[in-house]
Image: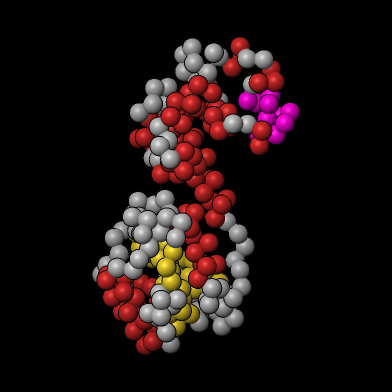
Amino acid sequence: MLIRSLPEDERPQEKALRYGVEALSDAELIALILRTGRKNTSSVNLAEDILSICDEGLFSMGTFDTDDLLGIKGVGPGKACTLMAAVELGKRIAASRKPVKYVADDPETIADMFMENLRYEKKEYFKSVLVNTRSEIVSVDNVSVGELTRTLVHPREVFSRAVKKGAYGVIFVHNHPSGDPTPSEEDLATTERLIEGGDILGIKVLDHVIIGDGRYESLRALDIIK
């Protein structure tokens, strides 16, 4: 059934205007983003086709890439990119917040800042969170992308940013695409090397938080970082 064949108060756009987008089903929300369906098929039906490949409900959409969507009849590059942009925007909204103070001794706050962005990534992202003497965030820097190794994450790259920005300390954050945040031997060896580099420069390594799927580990909480 085409959208124009539906009663006016059952059409996604009219329904959203009258009752608010929160009244729409998942399929109707996706239909609004897609705007059109395919020949003889409404955007709602196309949205239902997309949801049918979501084995874990809407959570699955956070792991999709454009190739996953292009395999659905009626989804071309334009629709795929539009939907992926909406998903990415949702991730950024979920993760965005004003920098909070006194985060250096609070791994939960750090984990909350990065969880929604990093839990879906299929590669390892390594970031440094620079803080001042009041433990306020100075900046968040991307250090590397790829499997974590001592070669990839070099103290020179990490601490050059900290020196330029006059940071007192640094909290490292990276994700495990497997979803298991348990520190690996490589994680521990890399952290030890970075602590040694920070000691030479007088910049304290305050914590290393590893992000998994809805879980995290803090090397300070594990008493690995003193």
Magenta stretch, overall SS = helix
Residue for point 56% across, 78% down = 135
Residue for point 49% across, 35% down = 83
- 18 drawn magenta: yes
Q: In this view, does 183 lie to the left or right of 8?
A: left
Please identify the quadrant where the N terminus is shown.
top right
How many numbered tags mark residues here?
A: 0
Q: Give the range drawn in magenta.
A: 12-21
Q: Is residue 185 left or right of residue 77?
A: left
Please identify the quadrant where the C terminus is shown.
bottom left
Residue for point 50% across, 82% down = 168
Figure quadrant of residue 196:
bottom left
Question: Where in the figure is residue 198, as x and y percent of width and height?
Answer: 39, 83
- 220 drawn magenta: no
Question: Can residue 163 be seen from the camera position used here?
Answer: no
Is 37 located above or below residue 57 in the figure? above
Is 98 located above or below residue 206 in the figure? above
Question: Where in the figure is residue 10, as x and y percent of width and height?
Answer: 66, 21
Residue for point 55% across, 67% down = 109
Question: Where in the figure is residue 169, as x and y percent of width and height?
Answer: 48, 80
- Specify how the rendered protein is coloured: secondary structure
Question: Where in the figure is residue 11, as x and y percent of width and height?
Answer: 64, 21
Question: Can residue 80 be seen from the camera position used here?
Answer: yes
